[in-house]
Amino acid sequence: MTVLALGRPSVLLEFLGRLQGEAPPLARITGISATPVPGAAAAGHGFTVLASGAGAGNGEIPPDSATCPACLRELLDPADRRYRYPFLN
């Protein structure tokens, strides 16, 4: 997976640290690399999810696993946006 993140250097460093430190319990990060993007200073603001480019995917189908306590709290909390979401894991 490729993530293109644009922002102030201090914010991007924090993002990289949190990406590893706050990953979900079953997440497996096999590597992280950072490359400066020419012209990034001229980019817009906000958050956008764009379609991936062409190429072979490297996604994996996760193994079946028990639902963690945090997910169960979300699943059973009527105030949570994931309340009764059937694919919560």
Image (cartoon, helix red, strand yellow):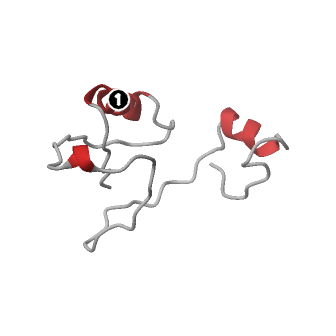
Task: Locate the N terminus and report the quarter of the image it occupies.
Answer: bottom left
> How many marks overall?
1
Q: Position of residue 83 (x, y in %)?
A: 78, 48
Query: Which of 33 and 30 lies nearest the eye of the viewer?
Result: 33
Residue 19, above or below 35: above
Q: Quadrant of residue 34?
A: top left
x 40%, y 29%: residue: 18
Residue plotted at (73% across, 55% down): 85
Q: Position of residue 44 (x, y in %)?
A: 35, 50
Is 45 on the left or on the right of 77, as rendered? left
- Residue drawn where x is 28% and y is 43% of the image: 30
Instruction: Indicate the position of residue 48 as horizontal and vertical percent values.
Output: 44, 55
Against 43, residue 73 (above or below) is above
Q: Is residue 25 above or below residue 46?
A: above
Q: With 44 as the anchor, is 40 left or right in this view?
A: left
Left or right of 71 on screen, residue 61? left
The residue beneath circle 1 is 11
Q: Residue flagged by tag 1: what amino acid is it? A: Val
Q: Residues within 10 Å of mark 1 (few under 14, many from 20)?
A: few
